[in-house]
Amino acid sequence: MPMDAPQITYPCRWQYTVVGENEQALRQILLLACAPGQVDICFSHRSSSGRYVSLKAEMTVASEEERLNIFRQIRGNSEVRFVL
């Protein structure tokens, strides 16, 4: 049975979690993808091997279009392994 899409009321606070190898590169990617909006970026986790790091970015998005556009910009960068 297909799941219904969540009902999101905009504007709202939205969070992206990004995983990659280079913390500074990930921070820049998030800043650029979320510009010109204000984004709060914080360290989330480092893998047990120390190779991967995850960051959480939270911001206010005005619409579904904006939310998905930011997601596509983050996901499209080769430095990013995963984005949630």
Image (tube, rainbow, N blue to C red):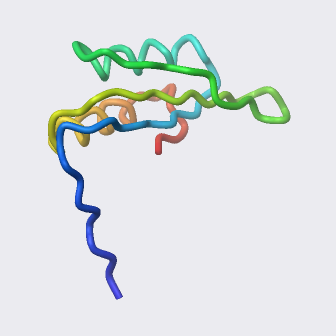
Among the 4 quarters of the image, the one containing residue 24: top right
Judge whether 81 appears above or below 39 on screen. below
Q: Position of residue 4 (x, y in %)?
A: 27, 74
Among all residues in the image, which is located at the extreme bottom? 1
Q: In percent of the image, x 35 and y 88: which residue is there?
A: 1
42 or 83: nearer the eye? 42
Among the 4 quarters of the image, the one containing residue 54: top right
Q: Position of residue 72 (x, y in %)?
A: 30, 38
Judge whether 69 appears above or below 39 on screen. below
Judge whether 79 appears above or below 23 on screen. below
Among all residues in the image, which is located at the extreme right? 49
Q: In percent of the image, x 51 and y 25: which residue is there?
A: 79
Q: Position of residue 28 (x, y in %)?
A: 44, 12
Q: In percent of the image, x 17 and y 42: which residue is there?
A: 10
Q: In percent of the image, x 32 and y 81: which residue is there?
A: 2
84 or 13: nearer the eye? 13
Q: Position of residue 65 (x, y in %)?
A: 15, 41
